[in-house]
């Protein structure tokens, strides 16, 4: 049971929050669960929505890398919402079934690039840092700019997972 009312309708809002509701629906296709929480604080939600737009829709990371990282971040933080929301997107973006199976707890081999992405996400998610070996693998596969983008993406999905976890809305 959620610990907070999940804002569902535009009519529940006014002013800046109502305008932000419209922008979120326009950019994401519907009012997504994290923003049903974040809209309780529109001054924060505006910035969170902008960052989310950047990491999802303006990223230089290839779609398969981005979606693999998003799914890995959801897994490392135990937020089922992230998996449920992004699994079909990941398939459309070309994430290999073997990589999805691996993230779902199965035994499968990852390509060097997949291993670099997943390894970095898991290290960041479990220790808030990355070993020299994980950094080097990620930098070789993604370049330094890609490592930076990956780090920001992990931070964004960590924030979503933590906030949704705090309000018990990760697994509705």
Image (spheres, helix red, strand yellow):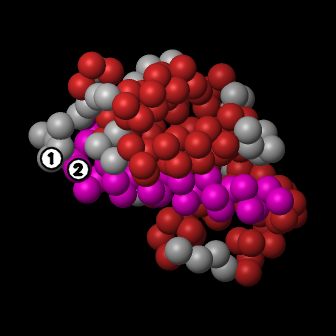
Name the element at disc 1.
loop
Confirm whether residue 118 shows in the render. Answer: no
Residue drawn at (78%, 52%) of the image = 113
Q: Is residue 70 left or right of residue 168?
A: right
Front-most of 4 and 14?
A: 14
Q: Earlier in the sequence, mark 1 or mark 2?
A: 1
Residue occupied by mark 1: 3
Vertical arrangement, residue 94 with respect to residue 2, above or below: above
Instruction: Categorize mark 1 by other alpha carbons within 10 Å: few (<14), some (14-19), many (20+).
Output: few
* Callout 1–callout 2 Cβ contact below 8 Å: yes
**Highlighted range, magenta:** 145-172
Quadrant housing the C terminus: top left
Q: Quadrant of residue 64?
A: top right
- Toward which corner of the image does residue 88 lie, by quadrant? top right
Q: CA distance from mark 1 to mark 2?
A: 5 Å
Looking at the image, residue 164 sits to the left or right of residue 116; the answer is: left
Q: Position of residue 97 (x, y in %)?
A: 62, 32
- Residue 167's tag is 2
| Residue pictured at 24% horizontal, 25% vertical | 12
Asked if the magenta segment contains residue 116, the reply would be: no
């Amino acid at each position: 049971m959620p610990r907070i009312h999940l804002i569902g309708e535009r009519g529940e809002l006014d002013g800046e929050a109502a305008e932000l509701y419209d922008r979120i629906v326009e950019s994401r296709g519907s009012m997504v669960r994290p923003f049903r929480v974040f809209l309780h604080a529109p001054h924060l939600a505006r910035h969170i929505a902008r960052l989310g737009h950047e990491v999802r829709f303006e990223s230089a990371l290839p779609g398969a890398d981005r979606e693999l990282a998003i799914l890995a971040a959801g897994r490392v933080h135990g937020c089922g919402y992230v998996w449920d929301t992004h699994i079909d997107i990941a398939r459309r973006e070309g994430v290999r079934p073997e990589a999805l199976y691996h993230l779902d707890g199965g035994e499968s081999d990852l390509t060097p690039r997949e291993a670099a992405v997943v390894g970095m996400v898991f290290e960041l998610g479990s220790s808030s840092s990355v070993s020299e070996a994980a950094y080097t693998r990620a930098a070789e596969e993604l370049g330094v700019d890609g490592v930076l983008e990956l780090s920001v993406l992990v931070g964004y999905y960590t924030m979503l997972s933590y906030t949704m976890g705090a309000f018990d809305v990760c697994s509705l």
